[in-house]
Image: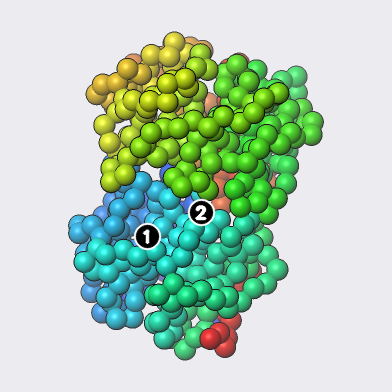
Amino acid sequence: NSTESRDLGLPATEVLAVSSSGQMAVLRRFRVSDNHFSHTGTLAQVSIGADAPRDLLDNVEAADWNPDGNSLAAVHVVQGETRLEYPIGKVLYETPGWISHVRFSAKGDRLAFIDHNLLGDDGGRISVVDLSGKKSDLTERWSSAVGLAWSPSGDEVWFTATATGFSRSLRGVTLSGKLRELLSAPGTLTLHDVAAGGRALISRDAMRAGAIGLAPGENKERDLSWQDWTVPNDISEDGKLVLFVEAGEAGGGEYAAFIRETNGASAVRLGEGSPIALSPDGKSALVLRQNLSPPQFALLPTGVGQQRMLPTGNVIPQFGQFFPDSKSVLFVGHEPGHASRVYVMELNSGQPRAITPEGFALGPNAHSVSPDGKLVATVTSDGIALVSARGGEPQPVRGSQPGDVPLRWAKEENVLFVGNRGETSCPVWRLNVQTGTRAAWKAFSPPDVAGVVGVACPRIAADEQHYVFGYIRNLSDLFLVDHLK
């Protein structure tokens, strides 16, 4: 009941959960996760006021103590799959998407969490799983779902979510799936915790996503944000056009794909879906229709023409890019019951062909294919690996590091631009894939970093001079809310 605070002497540490006995589960040595909304790091245990944490598990994104405070459930990323484990090592549920806000019930017999089916998107379902691994979805997919806790009585899961945009409200759902709204307010609400007496810790967030770019013929960066949630996903080869998604209130439930000249001209709406890549010839945009079941790719013309769906058989796509000839796509996807892997598909065939084993991915919205179309830079938990576009055994790249994302092949032979997404900047290096030599190139950051919680790595034009990058800003007020029932 005090507004005073004190330093616990744990620099660069994120608190995940506090046990009934005063033990903290914390995250150390973390980086921005591949899902873009959380952190991945080393799970550790430490007593409040103790000197040093004890490391428990690497590649963790979330955790919670059981009611007795003697063991932990953890969200553990392994070879491209996100696993909910309890106890640590026993998999209760796994997904090629991501999992957030894991919370034990008061009885300790089940865990509630948000099941996000797509990386880079905070939409998801409210779900529970019992200790035998039986999972139930309590709701349909929300456009944005962030924040979850059990109700004081334990017969509901409380969460903050919205069906469209980002204006989340506080809702409750019973284990039988009965929904109700508890609290709404102007802006975006995020539930952080609920006390046994019913008081809730809730923030009201002013969230915006923006885009910044440097256009040909200009020597100063320009703000290319369009509406409330502009996420740039690609730039044309000549640097004159940016492809972006509006995913906030203006984007609606399925989002909207736009193109805009980087000189600041008005944007042109292409259609529904989350845009992923521009074709090198500039004629088409690859989009993901994430609200279809299952999600599907589509091609939207940048000029005259109609949308064309791209069936991928029994492979569920996540994101991808074009080959240099604009006739094939490279994408990450998974078959039901399997982990993600990388596929190649000719646009006219509709038959995806896997080129990597399970557990390999691509950098989101990157140009991973070499200029001759023969090599692909893939992403693993350890760094970057190269694989033939025909398929084969991926070969790790010397000099790459965990969290590295391939951005584009450079004009210089055997050199790859790689970035490592951060909270207030994205540093980019030139990495020689033959020698492992790594040289700093540029760091990308908005001019004002107040409230910035994530900076996406740039989309780089072919001349290596022009680019566009995105960022997320969140300015919050924290409230203690009484009398919720």
Determine whether label 2 and label 1 are within 8 Å by CB: no
Q: Could you tell me residue 355's position as x and y percent?
A: 31, 25
* Amino acid type, label 2: Asp
Q: Could you tell me residue 252's position as x and y percent?
A: 65, 51
- Residue found 27% across the figure and 75% down from its top: 109
Q: Is residue 375 visible?
A: yes
The image quadrant that residue 196 belongs to is bottom left
* Amino acid type, label 1: Ala
Tell me the crowding category of disc 1: few under 14, some 14 to 19, or many 20 or more residues within 10 angstroms, Cα based.
Answer: many
Q: Who is closer to the viewer here, 233 or 349?
A: 349
Task: Tell me the CA gap for discs 2 and 1.
Answer: 15 Å
Residue ID for mark 1 = 62
Q: Who is closer to the viewer here, 25 or 180?
A: 180
The image shows residue 348, relative to residue 12, as above or below, that is above
The image shows residue 277, relative to residue 246, as above or below, that is above
Specify how the rendered protein is coloured: rainbow
Q: Could you tell me residue 477's position as x and y percent?
A: 64, 69
Q: Secondary structure at mark 2?
A: loop
Residue ID for mark 2 = 122
Q: Who is closer to the viewer here, 124 or 456?
A: 124
**What number of labels is visible?**
2
The image quadrant that residue 257 belongs to is top right
Q: Could you tell me residue 465's position as x and y percent?
A: 63, 20
The image quadrant that residue 350 belongs to is top left
Q: Is residue 152 left or right of residue 58?
A: right
Q: Is residue 76 left or right of residue 449?
A: left
